[in-house]
Image (cartoon, helix red, strand yellow):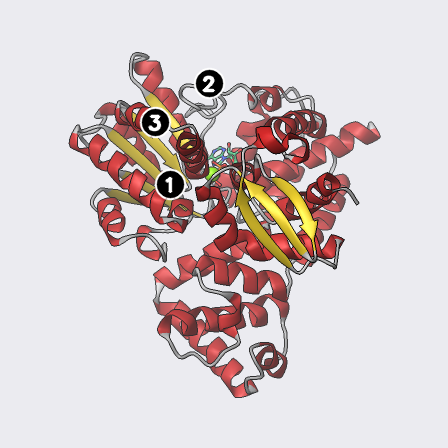
């Protein structure tokens, strides 16, 4: 196999374990220079990417390459400019083009919002689809909503920063982008910038590569409203935290508004530096919880409000009852039911809905595995998976290990002896003790509850 093909095949595997922005950030302009004597030489564009690949992705890269070519035993990372090794490189543009096409063709539905999704203002990064007009407020998000309204009225002087956290698909991105859109609607001379933290990292990587850090800093420090989405990802590297810290301070001192979202509260982001934690805690922290049945029904009705379709009430009730923990999934199930009836040319009815939704739910259950639990728990607490197996009694390791055991028991119903076995041959009583301990602790410790909820989100979504 050619070097180029080998790398493309490996990337296809690596990509499955990463979010799209991470993948694009860390793997653009990479390639294989040569394979010789079991050593694959992978070139990367700069030192920063080199360190990152070595420290964080080495295992996945090696694993992916070895699955394709078992001769490879080692990887050597070198810095090289793509111009010099152009042919083998994986370039961001080609992937983006592909992605755009697949987004459109996969949508299936004749839904204008799908097209609208693609129109994002490059300056503000805001998606016009996210507004308050189509945002449903209920007891699950009313605190976050109220804080958002207060900020819109008193930019920079009411709550700063505003920190919103909550599980996957519960409307954090929608809410914080709606704030941005609303602020601009009121005053379009303001500089608003929405940025997912992974994109922020990508910008820093690019700036470092092109020696344009000064320009990037300048760009961020003249903003009136900075909205940073999914901030938990910046906690993965010191360089990002450092850059963000300085940007944060510079805006904060000038009374510029900062809004941050995360999948968990600041104190639960294990590797977040103290100085950032305390900055985040200095403002307003609001959580977004789970919508109740009535709210879910209302959300569905809002979603179909602007589509020209009639859906029987019992179908909407059924969808609301069967999709409890994620608004994105709620919408997804609605769209799936509509699509199925379109395809089969039959009116939407409860039987179709039941069929579609039950198969879909079995699918997501099927994908949990011991491997995923170990991977997600270790990533969440930023420890090495092998630490689960050793005898370490360090608190940093003991708790994640107990949580991993707990999740295997709860989610996969694995027997206690077999759980013990998987954790370096521990006794079944250790497994019982761990599961009981976490179970007990969960009743009184809401922080732990948040953490486990975030980990489960990760397990179900990856
Ligand atoms: P998160 O950022 O918390 O993962 P998103 O903001 O991406 O979640 O929301 C997922 C989907 O659910 C989006 O399509 C969004 O428009 C929709 N959604 C979330 N919350 C609401 C809400 N309160 N009202 C209407 N739609 C919502
Ligand atoms: Mg989001």
x%, y% of residue 152?
28, 25
Rendered view: 209 above or below 402? above
Report whether 36 appears left or right of 141: right
Q: Secondary structure at mark 2?
A: loop
Q: Measure the C-alpha gap from mark 1 to mark 3.
A: 22 Å
Q: Does residue 262 appear in this view? A: yes
Rendered view: 262 above or below 203? below
The tag earlier along the polypeptide, 3 or 2, is 2
What residue does disc 1 label?
261
- The quarter of the picture where the N terminus appears is top right
Q: Residue at x 58, y 49 (%)?
A: 461
Question: Could you say which is closer to the camera, residue 275 or residue 80?
Answer: 80
Q: Measure the C-alpha gap from mark 2 to mark 1.
A: 20 Å
What residue does disc 3 label?
216
Report whether 333 appears left or right of 302: right
The tag earlier along the polypeptide, 1 or 3, is 3
Q: Nearer the viewer, mark 1 or mark 3?
A: 3
Rate crowding at label 1 as few (under 14), some (14 to 19) or many (20 or more) other CA atoms within 10 Å.
many
Q: Residue at x 35, y 32 (%)?
A: 227
Rendered view: 78 above or below 128? below
Question: Could you say which is closer to the camera, residue 115 or residue 360?
Answer: 115
Q: Does residue 175 appear in this view? A: no
Q: Quadrant of residue 336?
A: top right
User: Does the closest atom of ligand 2 sit within 8 Å of the Cβ of label 1?
Assistant: yes
């Amino acid at each position: 196999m050619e070097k180029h093909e080998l790398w493309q095949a490996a990337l296809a595997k690596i990509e499955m374990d990463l979010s799209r922005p991470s993948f694009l950030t860390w793997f653009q302009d990479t390639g294989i220079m040569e394979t010789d004597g079991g050593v694959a030489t992978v070139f990367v564009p700069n030192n920063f990417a080199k360190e990152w690949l070595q420290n964080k992705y080495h295992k996945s890269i090696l694993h992916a390459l070895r699955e394709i070519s078992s001769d490879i035993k080692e990887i050597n990372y070198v810095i090289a400019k793509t111009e010099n090794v152009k042919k083998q490189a994986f370039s961001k543009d080609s992937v983006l083009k592909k992605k755009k096409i697949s987004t459109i063709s996969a949508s299936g539905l004749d839904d204008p919002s799908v097209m609208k999704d693609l129109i994002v203002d490059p300056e503000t990064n805001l998606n016009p689809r996210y507004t308050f007009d189509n945002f449903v407020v209920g007891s699950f998000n009313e605190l976050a909503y109220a804080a958002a309204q207060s900020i819109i009225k008193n930019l920079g002087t009411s709550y700063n920063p505003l920190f919103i956290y909550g599980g996957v698909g519960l409307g954090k991105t929608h809410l914080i982008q709606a704030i941005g859109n609303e602020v601009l609607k009121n005053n379009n001379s303001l500089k608003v910038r929405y940025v997912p933290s992974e994109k922020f990292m990508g910008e820093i990587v690019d700036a470092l590569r092109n020696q344009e850090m000064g320009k990037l800093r300048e760009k961020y420090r003249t903003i009136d409203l900075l909205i940073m989405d999914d901030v938990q990802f910046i906690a993965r590297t010191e360089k990002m935290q450092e850059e963000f810290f300085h940007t944060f301070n510079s805006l904060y001192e000038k009374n510029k508004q900062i809004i941050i979202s995360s999948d968990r509260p600041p104190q639960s982001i294990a590797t977040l530096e103290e100085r950032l934690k305390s900055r985040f805690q200095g403002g307003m922290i609001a959580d977004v919880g789970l919508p109740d049945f009535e709210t879910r029904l209302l959300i569905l009705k809002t979603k179909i409000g602007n589509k020209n379709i009639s859906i029987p009430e019992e179908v909407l009730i059924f969808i609301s009852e069967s999709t409890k923990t994620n608004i994105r999934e709620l919408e997804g199930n609605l769209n799936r039911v509509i699509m199925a009836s379109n395809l089969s040319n039959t009116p939407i009815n409860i039987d179709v809905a039941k069929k579609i939704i039950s198969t879909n739910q079995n699918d997501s259950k099927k994908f949990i595995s011991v491997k995923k639990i170990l991977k997600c728990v270790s990533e969440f607490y930023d420890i090495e998976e092998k630490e689960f197996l050793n005898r370490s009694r360090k608190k940093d390791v003991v708790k994640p290990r107990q949580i991993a055991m707990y999740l295997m028991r709860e989610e996969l119903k694995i027997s206690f002896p077999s759980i013990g076995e998987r954790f370096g041959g521990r006794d079944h009583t250790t497994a019982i003790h761990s599961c009981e301990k976490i179970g007990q602790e969960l009743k009184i410790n809401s922080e732990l509850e948040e953490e486990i909820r975030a980990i489960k989100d990760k397990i179900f979504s990856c």
